[in-house]
Image: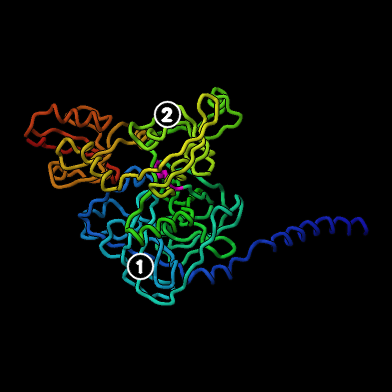
Amino acid sequence: MLRKLFIILVLILPAQQLYAENRNFPDFTQLVEKTAPAVVNISATRSANQNTRRSLLDEFFQRRGVNPQQESRPQQNSEGSGFIISDDGYVLTNRHVILLADIITVRLNNGREYKAELIGEDSGTDVALLKIDGDDLPVLQTGHSEQLKVGEWVLGFGAPFGFDQTVTAGIVSAKRRTLGTEQYVPYIQTDVAINPGNSGGPLVSLNGKVVGINSQILSQTGGYIGLSFAIPIELALHVAEQLKEYGQVHRGFLGVQYQNVTYDLAQAFGMEKVEGALLTRVTKNSVAANAGLKKGDIVLTLGGKSVERAGELPFIVGLIAPGTTVKVDFLRNSKIQQLDLKVGERPLPAEEVAEAEQKFDSSNLGMMIENINDEIRKTIESDGVIVSRVQDGPAARAGLRRQDIILSLANQNISSVEQFNELVSTLTKGESYLILVLSSTGGYRFMSLQIPN
């Protein structure tokens, strides 16, 4: 009898212990009730003939909120999320949610709708600031993402696939992540379930404060697979203040290119620790060159902030107001040195676009093209160039559309923008040539492209 009782106790006690542990799981109900009123659904309506200047390489993999097949329809609609940061109606969201929208509608959880004014947008961080007319609106308090710890619980709010007021939970997986060309954002990585429609929604800590804006997922299917990324709230608020005051963002600029310091490189440079940003190029007459930095220098600190990895350098520089003088600690010839550097200003997006048009639209076909990256090349198992913009001209008349990938022209395979433009320059003006395209909808098709006189 005693033996049976002992066996029963052995079986019951672990179950009771597990139950007790489960009872310690956080209860999100009060946090959700407190947060939900300030989370909004955002609908963006845009004309089908609008052209976008956002990166097609990002859009090809990550931002498929608008179906390319909709481009032939009178209007395009996209859904996203956002949250109210002031009781007089300022709303934060992602730029790609409202990009080129003619009408922006903000809907609160009580069903009330407002027409929103776009105060400003920033392509460098994918942050947009909206304004709706209202008083005493519910507001979310903002926290500090730097205080987040890996493994900490966080909640994501939004409207995945159009389902308003959806809440998902997860943990912080990592901090200060870099993603492709998004060089100004030290992303918070989480395993919170984020899907199309969650973009722009708040990432909230257990103390009920916003710590980030849910922005991207890393997925080749467009759906959640456990890798979600949020923009730190401090950075988003910094951008929002500049958009409110200037209508655009002024960020610092050095004029350098850089790479990570590996263990082997650290040994070669006589470093005790693997850290810093190794400068691989210092542009002539840039602020970095004028201050005395050279190729081969390793930047260790800038403005009092440590550069642990190369990808952190643009985070730090981008937050410094142009014209500010900062101290730079760097390694040269195995010795740590210091200099003063007056931070420059990064060229505005309009200037960058003008430069890109001169570089990429030299063929006079009425389109802009970009080189594809290794991910796209691997996916389509071919070289090519991607169409990033189409205006009136031979390309539009041939039927080319944004996001099409040009594979060949005049029976010659296309490998780069430069090779494409060089080929066009050798073809007979006024003649038409076959061009093979991988459509943005996934099909292959031949077109007849006329070379302009």
Residue assigned mark 2: 294
- Find numbered disc 2 in the image and state the secondary structure of the residue it sits on: loop
Disc marking residue 131: 1
Tell me which corner region of the image, top left, top right, bottom left or bottom right, holds residue 147.
bottom right
Q: Mark 2 is on which residue type?
A: Lys
Render colour scheme: rainbow
Give the answer, above or below, for where 380 lies relative to 170. above
Report x, y in % for residue 72: 21, 54
| Front-most of residues 220 and 113 | 113
Q: Position of residue 206 (x, y in %)?
A: 59, 62
Amino acid type of the residue tagged 1 in the rendering: Lys
Q: Which sits in the foreground, 34 or 29?
A: 34
In the picture provided, is 313 more to the left or to the right than 377? Answer: right
How packed mark 2 is, by other alpha carbons closer than 10 Å (few <14, some 14-19, many 20 or more), is some
The one nearer the camera, 423 or 115, is 115
Q: Is 231 located above or below residue 340 in the figure? A: below
Span of residues in magenta: 181-185
Which quadrant of the rendered structure holds the N terminus? bottom right
Numbered-mark total = 2
Query: In the rendered structure, are the residues bearing label 1 and label 2 in contact, judged by CB atoms less than 8 Å apart?
Result: no
Q: Residue at x 13, y 33 (%)?
A: 433
Question: Residue 265: where, in percent of width, then height?
Answer: 53, 25
- Quarter of image, res 104: bottom left
Is residue 394 one of those drawn in magenta? no
For image coordinates 38% across by 70% down, the residue present is 107
**Which numbered mark, 1 or 2, is in the foreground of this view?**
2
Q: Residue furthest right?
A: 2
Q: In the rendered image, is residue 402 in sight?
A: yes
Quadrant in the picture for the C terminus: top left
Report the residue at 42% width, 67% height from top. Answer: 40
Is any atom of residue 64 visible in this view?
Answer: no
